[in-house]
Amino acid sequence: MTVDVHSHAFVPEVDALVKDRSEKQAEPETRRRAMGAASAEYNATTMFPAVLPKLTSVQQRLRDMDEMGIDIQVVSPTSVQHYYWADLDLARQIVSLTNEKIAEQCARHSDRLVALGNVSLQHPELAVEQLDHCTRKLGMRGVEISTTINGLELDNEAFAPFWARAEEIGCVVFIHPSGTSLAGRLNRFYLENIIGRPIETTIALSHLIFGGVLDRHPGLKIIAAHGGGYLPFYAGRSDHAYTVRPEAHAVKHSPSEYLRRIYFDSLVYSPESLRNLISKVGASQVMMGTDYPFDMGSYDVHGLLQAAGDRSNTDQEAIRGANAVRLLGLEELAAKHTAASSGK
């Protein structure tokens, strides 16, 4: 069985809710400054119109899953709909609407789709309430958050209640970047996305490690998008700093050891990169991820895993689906798929 842990849905009703806000109306100019006029125009006129039907149509999603050979897809919000600028009342409405719509879509096809929700981390106390609601009332398996929240890093003390609650209830936290803090230097050639977003994930994971969040909450279930950015591929530098720099030696273990407690999607594009990722973090920590339906996604997950080289059947099964089944608590759903396949 194959599980895709990285895919997105878009909720048009949420954009209708915020369309008159000045922050929303400023988005086109913000994007032009961040990624450059050429990329912003292409996204607005070509890329987004092409993917919108796939972001909103469950039937199209299911057909595409069949073509990709994906049995179960984990659906999370698009990062552009976090809207961390929203005040308390609006944030409550945004998250409620987002989570209810995604949960409703997934519930209609509960044999194929699993939902992750949104939370308003700019309001940490509200985020804890939303975390409880989406997991306990709506049946979501966790939430997606960005790599930074209005300029605050994820190890900021303001977010301590969120991390504590996420660990307590055992839900998944999927860390996915939205833009990049280096946008001024990356506003040509689509570098804002090509290298900027993996850099954001690298920074976020580094703060969680060096900031002690993973020491304080060893039971956290974190999935890092895009193979964890660049951190797994250059962890030796972090380990070296841990040995020679006192300010980088405040945590209990060398940084690379924490990588074997974080989960990573397979969205690294090349077989060589996937082999390297697996060697750094272990086959038990890697899961299939497509970034469906965006053009920066990678959809031949079976071909990529096969091309990454000979691995044991156990490792291949783990990466293809067993790791996600264990992490997300999908054992019952997996058993149904196995039974259905056996009956064919």
Image: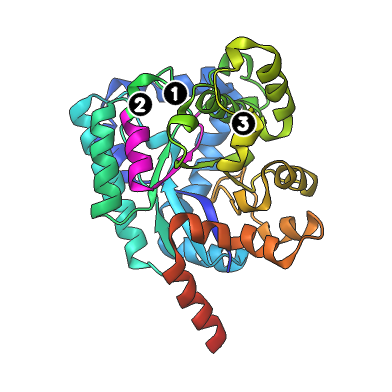
**SS at badge 1:** loop
Viewer-nearest residue: 45 or 246: 246
Rendered location of residue 255, percent (x, y):
63, 28
How far apart are the two marked residues, 2 and 1, measured between alpha carbons?
Answer: 7 Å
**SS at badge 2:** helix
Q: Tell me the residue that label 3 is attached to.
A: 198
Q: Which mark is residue 159?
A: 2
**SS at badge 3:** helix
Rendered location of residue 61, percent (x, y):
48, 61
Viewer-nearest residue: 325 or 145: 325
Q: Are marks 2 and 1 in contact (CB under 8 Å)?
A: yes
Where, by quadrant of the figure, is residue 58 drawn?
bottom left
Question: Is tag 1's residue or tag 3's residue first in the polypeptide sequence?
Answer: 1
Q: Amino acid at mark 3?
A: Pro
Q: Amino acid at mark 1?
A: Asp
- Specify the segment rendered in magenta: 161-178
Tag nearer the camera, 1 or 3: 1
Rendered location of residue 232, percent (x, y):
68, 35
Rendered location of residue 267, percent (x, y):
64, 45
Label 2 packing within 10 angstroms: few (<14), some (14-19), many (20+): many
Q: Tell me the residue that label 1 is attached to.
A: 155
Q: Is residue 13 visible?
A: no
